[in-house]
Image (cartoon, rainbow, N blue to C red):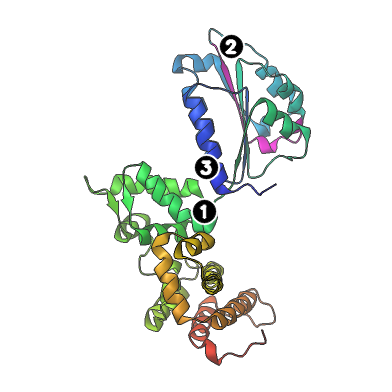
Amino acid sequence: MAKFSGKDTIVKYSQILGDLKKKIYKPVYLLMGDETYYIDKLSEFIADNVLPENERSFNQTIIYGKDVDNISQITDTARRFPMMSNYQVLIVREAQEIKEIEELEAYVKNPLKSTIMVICYKGKTVDKRKSFYKTVVKNGEVLESVQLYENEVAGWISTYIKHKGFEIEHDAAAILADFLGANLSRIVNELNKLFTALPENRKKINSLDIENNIGISRDYNTFELSNAISDRNVLKANKIALHFSKNTKEYPFIVTISTLFAQFSKILKYHTLRLQRLSDRDIIAALGINPFFIKDYETAARNYSMFQAIKIISLLREYDMKSKGFNYAAADEGELLRELISKIFNVDYINYEL
């Protein structure tokens, strides 16, 4: 069975949300996984829309996993009939705290049709091999909420912004993704603040907006550093590295080196794909990048041969180990970064047995 992906999550989320909007309800929803954004969105939609506000005080119950001593606290509530309503809603938050969660299977096998139970199981998934999961799949609905891959986040940001009636420049989306990571809840929170801060009637977001309202420097970030190195812009790369070295808490070495490793891994992959004479479209799909950035990889591939990219990846591994103290005296992260940048630009003079 293929591994479930962040894109699969979006498709499944859209399907469940579409059914809910059409008032097609299932008796049990198991919302699980490490991406909490979609779990929260669906549980909030159910809480806010299934019942009219005047019915919620009688027919909507929220139970927290840490407060559950016995599974009967959930099942007894689930088996109640609604008062003067077609449905009751039962939301179990922090369900991952319930050790005997699989004991819910007896209820799920024969759920009350007038109860809509929502199980929010955050940070992990239930065992898919066991009958509890299979019973929920049969009688209810399961959302496995998986985090997006790093190379998918900028595209997600652009799509989210478009749905809100705005646009964002490609570089600005990449900077946001680089700085905020794959935590969608954090991204949405920052974007919503940005929407309110934009001048009236302006719908396009640029990197200056990001810098002014979110606090991400458009000149000093790992996205700009990797671009400067790819372009062989020695002056710009060293300027950014110097800034990073003076602000190591804000720019951790491990984050920087991870970004560079991802960049040069893609440069190496670009070379191998070109050797296969693939089209730009196929290369874009294989690299998992926005088509806007294909020119950047063409430039990087001209600046670094396949052999150089391999040597630089080895170099990055070496400095990752050094930063963790393996076979190397403790060194300041800033010093390590400046030394690493210098060696990348002088990669031809580094001897490795590959």
Label 1 packing within 10 angstroms: few (<14), some (14-19), many (20+): many
Q: Nearer the viewer, mark 3 or mark 2?
A: 3
Q: Residue 61 placed where, x, y %?
A: 58, 22
Q: Is residue 148 magenta?
A: no
Q: Mark 3 belongs to which amino acid?
A: Ile
Q: Which residue is mark 3?
A: 10
**SS label for mark 1:** loop
Name which quarter of the figure residue 299 lies in.
Answer: bottom left
Say whether residue 27 is left or right of residue 134. Answer: left
In depth, the one of 155 and 188 nearer the eye is: 155
In primary-sequence order, the first of circles 3 and 1 is 3
Range of magenta residues:
86-102
Q: Which residue is mark 1?
A: 182
The residue furthest bottom is 349
Q: Mark 1 belongs to which amino acid?
A: Ala
Q: Mark 2 belongs to which amino acid?
A: Pro
The residue furthest top is 84
- Which mark identifies residue 204? none
**SS label for mark 3:** helix
Residue 66 shows up from this direction = yes
